[in-house]
Image: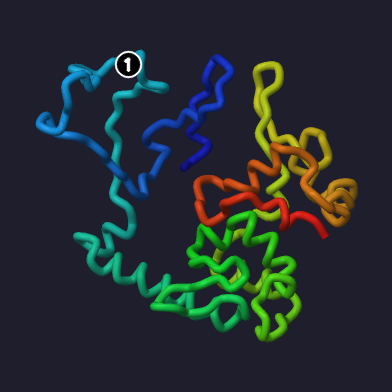
Amino acid sequence: VDRQDRVIVPRQTDQWVQRARGVRLAALWLGGRTASELRPGDPVAERWIPELEANPVSEVWASRSQQDDEAPHGGLGMKREEEERQARGLALVEAVSYLEKRDEELFCLLCQKWANEAHLQCPRHIFRAQRAQDYLPEGSPKLEPGSSEVESTVAGIKVPGERLYILRRWQGGWEDDYCELCRKWAPSTHLSSKAHQYQVENLRELPNQALRDLWQADEGDSSCLPALDADFTQ
């Protein structure tokens, strides 16, 4: 999503309105039923009703990506992408002791879950990676210092650990970042401030339910569930 192409809405809402040209659709899942599958009494919309849509829009916009230009029909491009993914996986296994290669996929020994890229950025995994020795199965070799940093670098993933305390809040008709840990608004310099770093270093448990909810269900990654209360005390 190109966030510079955001549509500013005149009213307070928790929705992010974006122009179609600023969004690249990576995957689409459609679910539907045929007329023969409908039962008597099922609701049926004979026509599109804009009032029922959160942000009605009628716009068609498309452009050819560089990958499309290099690989017609997606054949070579898909193969190259798969090879790069496997190479990243092998590099991770060599660099990080708590990842294993199982059935051509990565497996996380800390969380006992398959380690796709979404899982490696999951708050539960990041929390355990920072204390990896406490979560490794018995008999596992000790980790080298800085292993979690090696993981994020090799995978090409920017681990958003320091932003896990930041939520978006509305006030007076405008929206901005708010640090739930320090209980104050968080400008661009807040995360590097001494006061915030002190709070992070001395954190013993999550301060409120808002952060617990954020850490328990991180943006649709089901590998971060269920409840994590036992992980957040030292």
Instruction: Name the image quarter holding the C terminus.
Output: bottom right
- Name the colour scheme: rainbow
In the image, residue 202 lies at what x, y percent?
88, 54
Residue type highlighted by circle 1: Pro
Residue 94 found in image quarter: bottom right
Relative to residue 8, is residue 200 drawn left or right?
A: right
Q: Is residue 197 above or below residue 212?
A: below
Q: How many tags in the picture?
A: 1
In the image, residue 75 lies at what x, y percent?
23, 66
Residue at left 56%, top 26%?
A: 14
Identify the residue position indicated by label 1 in the image. 50
Local secondary structure at mark 1: helix
Residue at left 26%, top 69%?
A: 76
In the image, residue 24 lies at what x, y percent?
38, 45
Residue at left 59%, top 56%?
A: 122
Relative to residue 229, is residue 74 drawn left or right?
A: left
Residue 77 found in image quarter: bottom left
| 10 Å crowding of disc 1: few (<14), some (14-19), many (20+) | few
Seen as rendered, the residue at the extreme front is 40
Q: Is residue 160 above or below residue 186?
A: below
Residue at left 47%, top 79%?
A: 101
In the image, residue 162 lies at what x, y percent?
72, 52
